[in-house]
Amino acid sequence: MSTFLELGLREEISKALIDLGYENPTVIQEKAIPQVIASSQDLKAFAQTGTGKTAAFSLPILEQIDADSKETQAIILSPTRELAVQIGKNIQEFSKYLKGVKVTTVYGGANIDEQIRSLKKGSQIVVGTPGRTVDLIKRRALKLGSIRWVVLDEADEMLNMGFKDELDKVLDATPVEKQTLLFSATFPREVESIARNYMENPIEITSGEKNKGSDDVTHEYYVVNERTRYEALKRIADVNTDIYAIVFCRTRRETQEVANNLIKDGYSADALHGDLSQAQRDGVMDKFRKKSIQILVATDVAARGLDVTELTHVINHKLPDQIENYTHRSGRTGRAGKKGISVALVNGKEKGKLRPIERIIKKKFVQANVPSGKEICQNQLMHLIDKVQNVEVNTNQIEEFLPSIYEKLEGLDREELIQKFVSLEFNNFLSYYENAKDLNDLSSSRGDRDSRDSGRGRQRDENMTRFFINLGRKDDLNPARLIGLINDQRITDNIEIGAIDILDTFSFFELDKNFEGQALSAFEENDPEFNGRGVNIEITKKERSGGGRGRGGNRGGRRSPSGKSNEGFGRRRSSEGSSSRRSGGGSSHRGRSSDRPDRASSDKKTGGFGRRRRER
């Protein structure tokens, strides 16, 4: 195995890496670092999450950077604030022995004036989110005329989030002669479109097989229905006594509801999503890294850039809308040589989504049974006993109290003492699971109906209004393009988008019911077209209780004129019967405009992706 010095890096960089505990490069680093140092050819690099991509592109840049010049020489674009901050922090650590090298990280949600002041002092390397980077270019605070390297990190997610326009503007501000480095954990068609648009004859390197999941991660699924989904989540948390996990949800609303329910039920949990301020997000992430929080409930976008190497589990409360995102989710665990488990909670309909994921990650999901109350109590009790057995006793501190304690307990024999101790610590837990139902017996619950398709009475969120639209798969409509079309009408800022069902010639989508009138008016006034077709939306007032896949029932509306935890336990119980609110019915796709593309695009090279509302 080679060393970093053997890859062509100077001693100052190698010393910083050794200080951080990195003695030998990973596979992607072994391939990328010498290539970027030796050649100015553009590079496409594909590696699983957690394999050291940040060092793979930043170390060769640091090796060649001109520290005597204050001009910006490298721009690194990242899809999210969290990932940008993490990259900036890593580069500062890598360059601590390099005199004169300065890194500035720019992103929305932070004080732009402070970022401008930092740029004016001179930064050879700028790490930024696309939206804030474009803002700074427009203000002439960020000048990219001397750029030698452009790095597109998590390139697939930047397209998913609709940053094509921003990428165009940033690339337009850079010289023609530069080296473009594209790094991605997955390899969808959209990444190829980036290469065609922004790169010239790139060389391609990979670490392992493209898109394949980590060998250190096992994949399990539990069959649930909407009535049992949250309870199954709690049982998985309870049976794993040392759980340290991220629970992924689709939307901000779902994320906050699940987190609130977990906190209410006594779990050490919190939420991470785009509705939080940057200070709140930083606070949550700091607590999670320090393990003050055991369970982090997050959206896909918010969780990008979480550099945590000890996660025991990733739990998909709902599978992602785009199956490639499963690779990003599961890649949060099984890092740095540690083993991890990726869990999917699926209803009967969602089971079909596992097969395409298996083809991408080249691994099989293993079905597991939702733990029983007896299993959970057994695990928790043995965990408690193990902790008692291994506790270190400081006799000096308790010695003066021992005579009184012995006197109090002298009437109890060994068995009675153990029984009372266990009961004191464990009674609430035993009571909670005393008559626990078998959650694997779905036949006793009507909740399975919640997951059925749109024409068969799927349970709907009462806060949402369901719309019909006269576009479908035959029009090249997909969820991202539909969300972009909705956002392009500027109905309102940050509108919640619910379930989306794309059919052959028409589709359905849900919007926050408070804006149904504005939605109808916006589509009518804007009279939009999609791939040359006039767009028609209507409210679906009533759904059929059975039958085939029709338009979801009688429709009405206007048409457009175009035709906290105990020691040793995953939670504490404040009451025996605490239960959850359901976070919404099962659906094929869910979203919110601020987590989704905000404009549809007819550019075929981008795979039809628009852009999401940016976090400025």
Image (tube, rainbow, N blue to C red):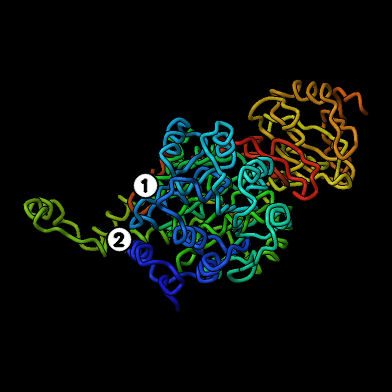
At 85% across and 37% down in the image, what residue appears? 530
Quadrant holding the N terminus: bottom left
**Residue 115 picture location, percent across and down:** 45, 36
Could you say whether the residue bearing mark 1 is in a helix, strand or loop? loop
Within-10-Å neighbours for mark 1: few <14, some 14–19, many 20+:
some
Separation of residues labelled 2 and 1 (CA atoms): 19 Å
At 68% across and 64% down in the image, what residue appears? 360
Which tag, 2 or 1, sits closer to the chain's start?
1
Q: Closest to the observer: 288 or 459?
A: 288
In this rendering, would 537 be left or right of 461?
right
Residue type highlighted by circle 2: Lys
Residue type highlighted by circle 1: Ser
In this rendering, would 240 be left or right of 100?
right
Q: Closest to the observer: 160 or 251?
A: 160
Q: Closest to the observer: 46 or 439?
A: 46
Query: Where does label 1 land, which residue?
Result: 292
Q: Can you see residue 80?
A: yes
Q: Of all residues shown, which one is farthest toward the bottom?
A: 1
Query: Where does label 2 land, which residue?
Result: 387
**Residue 67 picture location, percent across and down:** 41, 53
Residue 612 lies in quadrant: top right
